[in-house]
Amino acid sequence: MAKEADWIKVVAKLNRLTLERELVWVRRDPPGSITAARNGRVFHFFGTRYRDKNIGIYEERYPFFTDEDTFHWDDRVVLAFYSDDWELQWELPRVAGIQDLYNTIRRRDANADKFAEELLKD
């Protein structure tokens, strides 16, 4: 069974592959299996396929109740494995680096680096 340190290495490798453009993430509609089961909202779902495995990542915002009538909004980034038809199979544990991977993917999706490069040429 993989330990937390192993999952941190997995996330770091996915981030490195993404930065090197060996792994391409595609923005897609979130699968029904995650939107139906949540009491929060799912933002920016991205999916990729690596070594015959569908992998998805998204941000979720949800109410965190501190009392029966008192809550505040909390958020988390979720990295998970999905079946061939994009049904949720298993969420990876919350480990260091998932937020960094998500930020890398969103930066690529926005073409932020290309924008900065072109702007600085002028």
Image (cartoon, rainbow, N blue to C red):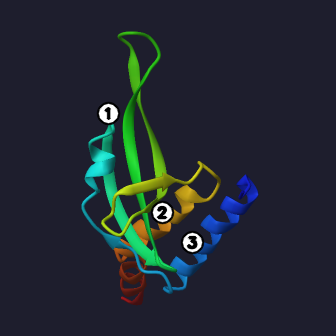
Q: Position of residue 55 (x, y in %)?
A: 45, 67
- Residue 79: mark: none
Q: Give SS at disc 3.
A: helix
> Would you name the residue on which mark 2 appears?
103
Position of the C terminus, as image quadrant, is bottom left
- Helix, strand or loop at label 2? It is helix
Measured from the top left, where is residue 47 in percent x and y? 38, 68
Badge 2 density bin: few <14, some 14–19, many ≥20, Cα 10 Å: few
In this rendering, which labeled residue sits more in front, label 1 or label 3?
1
Q: Residue at x 33, y 48 (%)?
A: 34
Q: How many marks?
A: 3
Q: Which residue is mark 3?
A: 15
The picture quadrant where one finds residue 39 is: top left
- The label on residue 39 is 1
Tell me which residue sits at (36%, 80%) in the image: 115
Question: Reading the chain from its start, which is encountered first: label 1 or label 3?
Answer: 3
Q: On the image, which quarter does residue 40 sit in?
A: top left
- Rendering coords of residue 108 (x, y %): 41, 75
Mark 1 burial class by Cα count in 10 Å: few <14, some 14-19, many 20+: few
Task: Look at 40% across and 51% down and name the residue there.
Answer: 59
Whole-percent x, y for residue 86 in the image = 33, 63
Mark 1–mark 2 CB contact (< 8 Å)? no
Front tag of 1 and 2 = 1
Q: Taking 26 as reference, is 97 left or right? A: right
Q: Which residue is located at x 48 percent, y 58 percent?
A: 80
Q: Amino acid at mark 1?
A: Asn
- Specify which label sits upstream in the sequence, 3 or 2: 3
Q: Amino acid at mark 2?
A: Asn
Circle 1 sits in a helix, a strand or a loop, which is it?
loop
Q: Between residues 121 and 108, which one lies in front from this camera angle?
A: 108
